[in-house]
Amino acid sequence: MSHTDSAVRHDNDAQLVAWAEAVAAQLAPSVAQHDAQGSFAFDHLDVLRREGALALTIPQTLGGRGLSLYQTLLFQRQLGRVSGPTALCLGWHLMAFGYLSQRPSWPAQTLQRLAQDVVQRGDLINILVTERDNGNLLRGAKPATVARRSGSGWVLSGHKAFCSSAPALRQMVVFASIEGEDRQGEFLVPRGPGVRVVETWDTLGMRATCSHDIVFDDVPLPDEALAHRFGPGPDQPSAFSVTSRAWGLQLPALYLGIGEAARDVALGFAAGHHSASLGGVILDAPNVQARLGEIELLLGAARAQLFGLAERWERNPALQDKLHHEVAITKVVVGRQSQRAVALACEIVGGHANSRRLPLERLLRDVQCSAFNPPQADAVVSQLARGATSAWRHRAAATTAAGVNAPPLAHPSADLQTSPSTAPSGQPSAL
């Protein structure tokens, strides 16, 4: 990555990206092996611990590095260029602390203790939401996982699916219904008796995330394990659904990195592949140049949209709760453009792209998973359509009452208050 990278604003960004490159380079030797075997990259986790990457979004006051959202996206993009699965596993962890630090709703002692466990012991965490047999909790279903009172504490029972980093999680934030209440709870659950991993993850892409199921068999918890109650209405949100869910932008950042990695593979291949019919390397062939130009167009637009939104969000605190649609749109658009960029890179390389001698086939499989991470395109499109319809009808009714025709609506979703969610890794999408 060079200083000409449009996302790098100043020397501090450049230093961060250079460090991220050095961290990512340490992961490279075993990426293909973990993909082929579907094994969790414990060696990658060791690197992240040693380099202090697990503490990137923990506030400096709690011993972390306190990276901003923008800086976190820079790091995630670079990590995604080398190992999408490791970037995704780390991303859920970083995202959790981003939310908890940005708009604290947990007891200070609970957050302090968790941060200390990460900084001092290297604990990896994740937020577990999805359940196989109970629908999508992010679209209105209530968790079948239940916490019930027992003496001075709790007993937790349930079954969570698509739990990224399942073999390595030392602590988990578990979304559960609270017996006898309408509200749900965020429970901080350590790995221990009653917590077991069921190996269900054998997938096309993001294989090394090892996003297996985790079952909680009457797990005893202390009273303070309940970190936060939320719901049932939107005025009582989860700790991980505030500030427009902007920390979820770590997802498109890592997929953008995958797209950029595929472009680089295609460039290297085309620059070294000689064609007798052309009398030179295929890099100069018009059809290759056309595809490269299209890749640059896709990735450049994605980069501008992603980092432009992150900077807008950071610079305007008053807007941070009003950018739900922009965050959701950016997630979908950047993911799609990254997918298309990888596909075009494969077209440039041709049949060689199918070979495991090149990383393109792995990049192609991994980037497909962007469609399954939250929020999914159908939810975003549906919300935008309802927003446009609702806003138009509201405007039309108001102007009709005033005796004039309804004017064109410049921003059809601007008046809609609800929005699709960029959620933690707890749905089939969360890998």
Image (spheres, grey):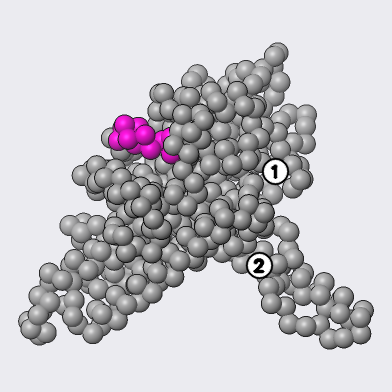
Name the element at disc 1.
loop
Residues at marks 2 and 1 touching, judged by CB atoms closer than 8 Å? no
- Left or right: 255 in relation to 25: right
Q: Left or right: where does residue 209 sit relative to residue 423?
A: left
In this figure, which residue is indicated by the disc labeled 1?
237
- Residue at coordinates 39% horizontally, 55% vertically from top-left? 10
Of mark 2 and mark 1, the one earlier in the sequence is 1
Residue 164 visible at all: no
Asked which secondary structure carries label 2, the reply is: helix
Residue 173, given in percent of the width and then of the height, sits at: 56, 33
Label at residue 169: none
| Magenta stretch: includes residue 50 | yes
Q: Residue furthest front?
A: 11
Residue 304: x and y in percent read 45, 66
Q: Nearer the viewer, residue 319 or 132?
A: 319
Q: Nearer the viewer, residue 66 or 152?
A: 66
- The foreground one among 379 and 290 is 290
Q: Which residues are magenta?
A: 46-56
Q: Position of residue 34 (x, y in %)?
A: 28, 43
322 with respect to 163 (left or right): right
Residue shown at the point (29%, 43%) measured from the top left:
23
Q: Position of residue 118 (x, y in %)?
A: 45, 28
Tell me: 58 left or right of 237.
left
Mark 2 belongs to which amino acid? Leu
| Residue at horizontal 38 percent and vertical 38 percent from the top | 53
Q: Which residue is mark 2?
A: 384
Magenta residues, dominant SS class:
helix
Asked whether residue 146 is drawn in magenta, I would say: no
